[in-house]
Amino acid sequence: MKNFNVDVLLPAIAKQYPDRSSGEFKVKEVVSIAESLGMSSSAAYTYVTSQEKISRGVYRIDLSSIVIPFKTNEKKAVTSVTSITNDEVFVPAKDDTYVKWGFCKDVEMIIKSKEFYPTYVAGLSGNGKTMMVEQSCARANREYVRVQITPETDEDDLIGGFRLVDGETVFCKGPVIKAMEKGAILLIDEIDRGSNKIMCLQGVLEGKPVLIKKTGEVISPAKGFNVIATANTKGKGSEDGRFIAATIIDEAFLERFTITLEQPYPSQSIERNIVKNHMDKFNCLDEQFCESLTIWSEAIRKTFIDGGVDEVISTRRLCHIVQTFSIFNDKTKAIELCVSRFDDDTKEAFMDLYSKVDASPEQGDSTTSSEQSINDIVDSI
């Protein structure tokens, strides 16, 4: 392969996609990196297609042995604290199966504006909040950093802290500082899972320069930097106990978010497209099963509102069912395995409800007839 070096290409791939732990890459992604390194695109194509094929145009490349070293200050004798950084800021890959809906257009407009406009996105679990932000960044070709909040998350995790590298104590900048310096989108995921330790972000949410107390550096946010947070609650805790780990967020902290978007579950027609695209992704398209699943999930949500069941089926759960169906090729088994996480009574209610949906006459694509089918099923419970 003329002008092609796999030992140079693999580290470049790992550096460009540090979060791609699955090792699954599209041919065009690898070819693009090879071209940026001055390598032959045809040689890169030949190399990729010789690897394990996952699906059409997607192959698995083993990067487990690749180590990307930290960028360190080469001077060993230092008179001040040395800091290190690594590449956690990147443009997420586009997902061709993603369906734009809800506040997606609004989020894209916010991201494309490159204005500092802190946004809080609240909604029930599994309705696509994080995916919406990620894909909006991908479509706008904007870099982002995703930070997962837990009760243990503190200033060291967010702003940065000292690390031991090559026998030397150095300061490692955290994801918040990296996003500020690069003018990227800072996605704070599950922000209502944090403790009062996340109050260190107060200044960050004002869009002003931040002092790193441990080094004395003052970091000014570059143009384009913005903060978008996702949560299951609006920062007031979970009164019904569904999100027991959700905390009450300080009012002064919440007040720094310019707007709050309340994300519902998608409509049945939108959810049908999401499920269908997911079936295409896993090569298990079944139009009738797709229709039954969306009628079933909508019926469960209406029953939940009426107090008939204590749980709901999320859009994410439907996608899990589709993937399970692609493996076992058994609709009932796929549903049963994916609702087994619920208690026995809820599981039995869900399975019974699906049996009513599957036994109902085929409704076709009419929205009116689908709604009537849902109402008839709910009324029969």
Image (tube, rainbow, N blue to C red):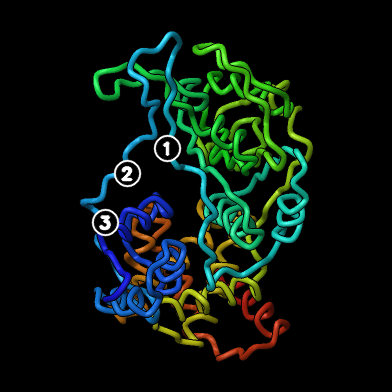
Residue at the extreme top of the image, as rendered: 79
Q: Position of residue 340 (x, y in %)?
A: 34, 59
Which disc is residue 58 wearing? none
Q: Between disc 3 and disc 2, whose residue precedes?
A: 3
Q: Position of residue 109 (x, y in %)?
A: 76, 55
As measured in the structure, the alpha-carbon distance from the residue carrying label 2 to the one carrying label 1 is 9 Å
As measured in the structure, the alpha-carbon distance from the residue carrying label 1 to the one carrying label 3 is 17 Å
Residue appearing at x 52%, y 67% in the figure? 95
Q: Between disc 2 and disc 1, whose residue precedes?
A: 2
Name the residue type under label 3. Answer: Leu
Q: Is residue 152 visible?
A: no
**Of the two numbered discs 3 and 2 in the rendering, the one whose residue sits closer to the viewer:** 2
Q: Is residue 58 visible?
A: yes
Q: Position of residue 239 (x, y in %)?
A: 60, 34
Residue appearing at x 62%, y 44% in the figure? 185
Judging depth in this view, the residue of 184 and 252 nearest the camera is 184
As measured in the structure, the alpha-carbon distance from the residue carrying label 3 to the one carrying label 2 is 11 Å
The residue beneath circle 2 is 68
Q: Are marks 3 and 2 in contact (CB under 8 Å)?
A: no
Residue appearing at x 58%, y 76% in the figure? 272
The residue beneath circle 3 is 63
Residue 244 vertical placement versus 350 (above, below): above
Task: State which quadrant residue 69 falls in.
Answer: top left
Residue at the extreme front of the image, as rendered: 3
Q: Number of numbered discs present?
A: 3
The residue beneath circle 1 is 86
Q: Are marks 2 and 1 in contact (CB under 8 Å)?
A: yes
Residue appearing at x 49%, y 34% in the figure? 149
Judging depth in this view, the residue of 70 and 208 nearest the camera is 70
In the image, 69: left or right of 236?
left
Q: Between disc 1 and disc 3, whose residue precedes?
A: 3
- Placement of the N terminus among the 4 image quadrants: bottom left
